[in-house]
Image (spheres, rainbow, N blue to C red):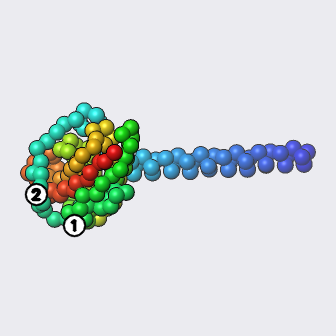
C-alpha cells in the first residue's frame, strides 16, 4: 500500500512539473509573438512597390546610420560589404537615435519598401537578399510621414549608402 501511494505521489509531481513547463513555454511563445508583431514585415507584393524618395537630402530630426562588416556609414562613409556572388542573405544593422516614436519609420532599399517599424533610439537588423546583394552601390532610406501612411508628407528622411563587392 505504501508503495502504491508513493507511486501516485511521484506521478503527480512529475505530471505537474511537465504541466508547468508547457505553461511556461506557452507564455514564452506568446511573449515572442507579441514582440514579433511590433516589427511589421511586409509581404512580397508590398516589397515590390517602389516609391519616389528625395534621394540625397536629409530632413527632420534624428540620426540614422548603418553598420556592416566593412564599417559604418557615419560621417558620410560608404561601407563595402564583401560577399560571394552566390550569397543568398547578408544582414546589416540600422542604428537610429532621436526618431519620433509616435510615427512609423518606413525602411527602403533602393526606393523599394522593405519594412516598417517604430524607431526611436534603436538598433535593428535588415536582411539583404536578391537585387540588394547585386554588385554596386545601394541606398537605404528611413522615412517618416506626417500621417503614418506612404501617401503623406515626409517629415523625416535619412539615408545611408553601402557598396556590394564580389
In the figure, 163 relative to 59: above or below?
above
x, y percentage for residue 85?
36, 40
Residue at 11% from the left image edge and 44% from the top image edge: 52
Other residues around mark 1 within 10 Å, as few (<14) / some (14–19) / many (≥20): few
**Marks 2,1: beta carbons within 8 A:** no
Q: Position of residue 109 (x, y in %)?
A: 23, 46
Q: Is residue 142 visible?
A: no
Q: In what quadrant of the picture does the N terminus appear?
A: top right
Residue at the spot 33% in from the left edge and 61% down from the top edge:
71
Q: Position of residue 25 (x, y in %)?
A: 55, 48
| Numbered disc 2: secondary structure | loop
Q: Position of residue 161 (x, y in %)?
A: 22, 54
Residue 75 disc label:
1
Say which of 25 and 157 sits in front: 157
User: Residue 39, relative to residue 156: is it above or below?
Assistant: above
Residue that lies at the very extreme toward the front in this rendered image: 166
Q: Nearer the viewer, mark 2 or mark 1?
A: 1
Q: Nearer the viewer, residue 51 or 8?
A: 51
Disc 2 designates what residue?
A: 57
Residue found at the far top of this picture:
45
Q: Is residue 139 left or right of residue 20?
A: left
| Left or right of 126 on screen, residue 148 | left
- The image quadrant where one finds the C terminus is top left
Amino acid at each position: 500500500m505504501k508503495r502504491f501511494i508513493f507511486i501516485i505521489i511521484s506521478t503527480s509531481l512529475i505530471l505537474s512539473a511537465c504541466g508547468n513547463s508547457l505553461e511556461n513555454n506557452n507564455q514564452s511563445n506568446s511573449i515572442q509573438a507579441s514582440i514579433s508583431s511590433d516589427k511589421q514585415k511586409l509581404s512580397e507584393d508590398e516589397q515590390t512597390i517602389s516609391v519616389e524618395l528625395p534621394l540625397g537630402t536629409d530632413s527632420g530630426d534624428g540620426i540614422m546610420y548603418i553598420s556592416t562588416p566593412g564599417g559604418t556609414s557615419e560621417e558620410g562613409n560608404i561601407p563595402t560589404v564583401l560577399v560571394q556572388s552566390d550569397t543568398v542573405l547578408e544582414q546589416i544593422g540600422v542604428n537610429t537615435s532621436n526618431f519620433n516614436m509616435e510615427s512609423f519609420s518606413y525602411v527602403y532599399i533602393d526606393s523599394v519598401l522593405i519594412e516598417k517599424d517604430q524607431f526611436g533610439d534603436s538598433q535593428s537588423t535588415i536582411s539583404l537578399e536578391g537585387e540588394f546583394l547585386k554588385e554596386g552601390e545601394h541606398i537605404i532610406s528611413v522615412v517618416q510621414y506626417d500621417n503614418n501612411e506612404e501617401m503623406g508628407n515626409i517629415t523625416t528622411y535619412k539615408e545611408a549608402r553601402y557598396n556590394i563587392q564580389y
